[in-house]
Image: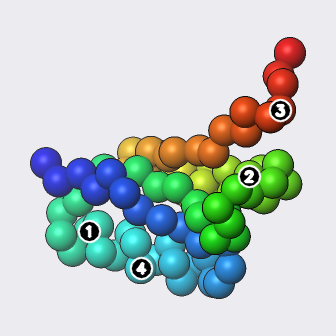
Amino acid sequence: MIIDPHVHLFVDGDRTKERDIIFTVCKRYNVKKIYVSTLAFNALRPDSGQIQISNNITNDFMRENPVLTGGLCYLNPLKIFI
């Protein structure tokens, strides 16, 4: 089984085209699982708004093909969840 644990999505650009390319490559090379994350505006320290947008993009991508796709998210240690 081939697993790609390091696939980046991007905030800018055509998400439909990006998705189609990733799924096509996975099918061509018989990749059974990928783990994606979104680069948050190429920021070294993204703010909470950028983190939310990035995590939403990752989550949306995972929902399109949950069998193939797992995701990695940003955590914001400055935000307290109660």
Q: Earlier in the sequence, mark 4 or mark 1?
A: 4
Badges 1 and 2: C-beta atoms under 8 Å apart? no
Q: Earlier in the sequence, mark 4 or mark 2?
A: 4
Residue at left 24%, top 51%?
3
Q: CA distance from mark 3 to mark 1?
A: 39 Å
Q: Earlier in the sequence, mark 3 or mark 4?
A: 4
Front of the two marks 3 and 4: 3
Front of the two marks 2 and 3: 3
Q: Earlier in the sequence, mark 2 or mark 3?
A: 2
Badges 2 and 3: C-beta atoms under 8 Å apart? no
Q: Is residue 35 left or right of residue 61?
A: left
Q: Which residue is mark 4?
A: 21
Residue at left 59%, top 44%?
73
Q: Which residue is mark 3?
A: 79
Q: Earlier in the sequence, mark 1 or mark 2?
A: 1
Badges 3 and 4: C-beta atoms under 8 Å apart? no
- Expressed as whole percent of the image width and height from the top left, the position of residue 13 reads 65, 84
Q: Which residue is mark 1?
A: 27
